[in-house]
Image: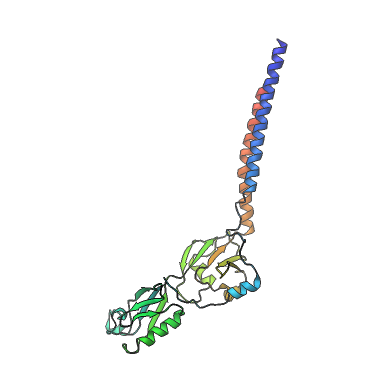
Amino acid sequence: MKLLKHIYHNLSHNATMRLLYTYLILALFLICNSCSNKQYQALFEKKGITTDTALQTNFAKILNYRIKAQDILQIRNLQNSKTIIDLTPTITSPSLQGATTQSENYQVEDDGTIPLTGLGRVRVAGFTRLEAEKYIQSLYLKDLNNPIIELKVTNLKVTLLGEIRSQANYTLTKDRTTLVEMIGEAGGLTERADEKKVEIIRSGPLKPVVITVDLSDIRSISDPKSILQSGDIVYVPQNSRAIRNDQTQNFSAILQPGLLIFSTVLLIVTLARR
């Protein structure tokens, strides 16, 4: 009888130890797996991205955007005229003579032209906004009395991501829009933002270039590097305090299940030894 009890006790003890080892291995696996998955890596890996300071400065130069195929142009004549239909402004009041309340939108064709009433197809690809404006104005001089042509490129956008209050794509509504102006339009930075390491990812001819702007420096407001260009991606990373808080929360989230498993194992061991 004593022999049977001894065998039963050993089997129970061995089964309990196996269960204990199983739970411990599972807990270690979960912890190691969580540590290996870095949740707060940089949004964009730096592989293949240029960080050379000299090249950053070169790409940060203020370059006037040149119109290309598929761009959307908004054109209007600021002078009142009845000779060109597409550029005729709608007058709502005698006091608004010479003003306009409507404009025409044109998509630049693959051949770089847009169709303009009275002129036919006019090539605008390769021009800056101001050059195209003056060129179209010169073409209409023979048909309009002192035309004043206004031209806007309405499809130029930048993308704001990270610790921005309103992450989205934003339209560049004017020439030389600064980083501060665009962040202001997006509602500003969150309290978790690292304002010293704001990144502008800009596509280069061969590979992207990362331009870092320190918004804690007042000089960054007038820094040419902060002038945005179409296609830029602005990324605002988390500050060190926010990263530490997140790491603490992650550790707690891992530790609590581990403690629960350990407590369960201890309870099983205690009950098995009774």
| Horizontal side of residue 65 vs 32, given as left or right | left
Q: Can you see residue 117?
A: yes
Q: Quadrant of residue 70?
A: bottom left
Please, is residue 237 above or below residue 155 in the view? above
The percent coordinates of residue 146 (x first, y second) are: 35, 89
At 43% across and 72% down in the image, what residue appears? 69
The percent coordinates of residue 81 (x first, y second) are: 29, 85
Q: Quadrant of the C terminus?
A: top right
Q: What number of labels is visible?
A: 0
The percent coordinates of residue 138 (x first, y second) are: 38, 87
At 54% across and 63% down in the image, what residue appears? 189
Residue in the foreground of this view, choosing between 226 and 184: 226
Q: Quadrant of residue 149?
A: bottom left
At 41% across and 82% down in the image, what residue appears? 133
The percent coordinates of residue 48 (x first, y second) are: 61, 63
Please, is residue 192 above or below residue 98 in the view? above
| Direction top: furthest residue | 1
At 42% across and 81% down in the image, what residue appears? 132
Residue in the foreground of this view, choosing between 216 and 150: 150
| Horizontal side of residue 68 vs 8, given as left or right | left
Residue in the foreground of this view, choosing between 248 and 15: 15
